[in-house]
Image (tube, rainbow, N blue to C red):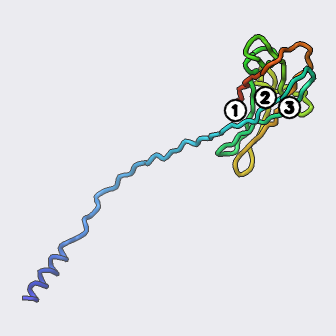
Amino acid sequence: MKKVLLAIMSAALMTMATPAMAGQATGTLAVSATAVINCTVTTTPVAFGSYAGTQLDAAGNVAFSCNAPVNATVALDQGGSFATTRNLSDGAAGSLAYELYSDVGRTALLGNGIYGATAAVASAGATNAGALPVYGRMPASAAYTEGAYNDTVNVTVNY
């Protein structure tokens, strides 16, 4: 019986064959990605402090950090006044003129390309960070009213 069973199994194994391939088909697989650069902007305020009618200078900073190296331009608008000069406002009728510059000598007006020039800044280092010092100046004035004055300047980093 063992011999018969072994013979049947051997015959069955011999008849089992790998199926023959009759042809071939090909195709393509699309592979894609979208590279994204993200940057964050932080600022240090330009705080002039107490104004007593004499010229005041102050400095602040615009910094940005990106997930990849970038060559950027930094633009600052005119602030809330949107006039031909920047003005701090007391929320009523009072205003104090000031300007922002990209150089410590306060000769290169910093703006948005229409009002003053933009500044080119490249990011560097492990965090792909860039920084632009902002230098402010309030000119001397004999006419002003006492109070708290503020302005908000919109910062845009284009990369």
Q: Position of residue 143 (x, y in %)?
A: 89, 12
Disc 3 crowd, CA 10 A, few/some/many (<14, 14-19, 20+): some
- Dot 1 corresponds to which residue? 158
Three-letter code, disc 3? Ala
Q: Choose the circle earlier in sequence order: 1 or 2.
A: 2
Residue 72: image quadrant is top right
Disc 1 crowd, CA 10 A, few/some/many (<14, 14-19, 20+): some
- Dot 3 corresponds to which residue? 58
Q: Does residue 80 sit above or below 107 in this rendering?
A: above
Q: Are marks 1 and 3 in contact (CB under 8 Å)?
A: no
Q: Farthest residue toward the left? A: 1
Q: What is the quadrant of the C terminus in the image?
A: top right
Distance in Å between CA atoms under marks 1 and 2: 10 Å
* Label 1 vs label 3, nearer the camera: 3
Q: Are marks 1 and 2 in contact (CB under 8 Å)?
A: yes
Distance in Å between CA atoms under marks 2 and 3: 19 Å
Give the structural element (helix, strand or loop) at label 2. loop
- What mark, if any, has residue 36 been given in the picture? none
Give the structural element (helix, strand or loop) at label 1. strand
Distance in Å between CA atoms under marks 1 and 3: 25 Å
Three-letter code, disc 2? Thr
Give the structural element (helix, strand or loop) at label 3. strand
Q: Does residue 43 sit above or below 24 in this rendering?
A: above
Residue pictured at 76% horizontal, 24% vertical: 112
Residue 141: image quadrant is top right
Three-letter code, disc 1? Asn
Q: Position of residue 28 (x, y in %)?
A: 43, 48
Nearer-the-camera pick, 85 or 38: 85
- Dot 2 corresponds to which residue? 118
